[in-house]
Amino acid sequence: MTETRQAPSTSPARPEAHLPGDGAMWVMVLGDLIIFGAYFVIYMVHRAMAPEAFLTAQQHLSLTAGMLNTVVLLTSSWFVARGVLAARAGDHTRALRLTYAGGLCGAVFIGIKVYEWSAKITEGYSLGSGEFFGFYYMLTGVHLFHVALGLLILGIVARELRTRRRMSMVESGATYWHMVDLLWIVIFALLYVMR
């Protein structure tokens, strides 16, 4: 009986698929998603109990500001994702520029949100202006805290790209930033769009 031998493969080794970032970051992200998921369910229950009051209050939000913030965060996530790809390719200068661009978009998001809040408060819609506005300020406020934390994390990513260049740190920062973006899309849909 003749033994068949296979010729050694000449194709380049393919990188192994892996979960990007650090496991601890994924635990944090999943925990945040569960907590926000509970907030969203509570909001939906309260909205179902008083749909007319929520709809009337919702009419006072600026759909334009909400859409602008959505575009800003989606653009930011695109920059951060491209930055990760550049870092993986070894182009750390480009990765750093893209990370800065993503962070700048995050700062613009905060500016738009602060402007929107001040406009609502000036119009007389504060935290105590009914259930809808209580949810509005709570959900957008907690999210705004996450954006600010995300900017700090992107700062750590930028430092990492300038010094040690550990991909797990870069990917972990991007993972967190994409979670912030995902949460905003759900908040935008619930508070601004859903009728």
Image: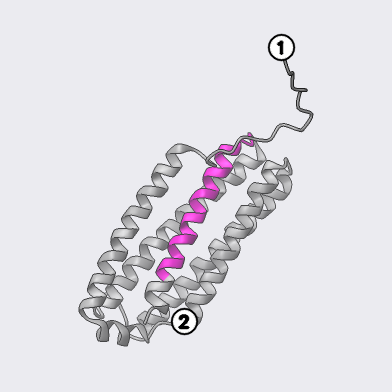
In this view, the residue in front, 57 or 101, is 57
Assess whether residue 131 is covered by the magenta stretch: no
Quarter occupied by the C terminus: bottom left
Q: Which residue is mark 1?
A: 1
Q: Which residue is mark 2?
A: 63
Q: Amino acid at mark 1?
A: Met
Residue 48 point in image, percent of width and height: 24, 77
Is 22 left or right of 122, judged from the image as shown?
A: right
In this view, the residue in front, 112 or 24, is 24
Labels 2 and 1 touching (C-beta < 8 A): no
Q: Is residue 79 above or below residue 51?
A: above
Q: Residues within 10 Å of mark 2 (few under 14, many from 20)?
A: some
Residue at image point 69% right, 53% down = 97
Is 154 left or right of 186, judged from the image as shown?
A: right
SS label for mark 1:
loop
- Dominant SS in magenta: helix
Is 134 left or right of 190, judged from the image as shown?
A: left
Q: Residues within 10 Å of mark 1 (few under 14, many from 20)?
A: few
Residue 8 point in image, percent of width and height: 76, 23
In this view, the residue in front, 77 or 5, is 5
Assess whether residue 185 is covered by the magenta stretch: yes
Which of the 4 image quarters holds residue 37? bottom left
Q: Is residue 167 above or below residue 130?
A: above
Q: Which residues are magenta?
A: 164-187
Residue 141 point in image, percent of width and height: 37, 65
Question: Disc count in the image?
Answer: 2
Which mark, residue 116? Answer: none
Disc 2 to disc 1, C-alpha distance: 76 Å
Disc with the residue nearer the chain's start (2 vs 1): 1
Q: Amino acid at mark 2?
A: Leu
Q: Nearer the viewer, mark 2 or mark 1?
A: 1
Is 177 left or right of 128, judged from the image as shown?
A: right
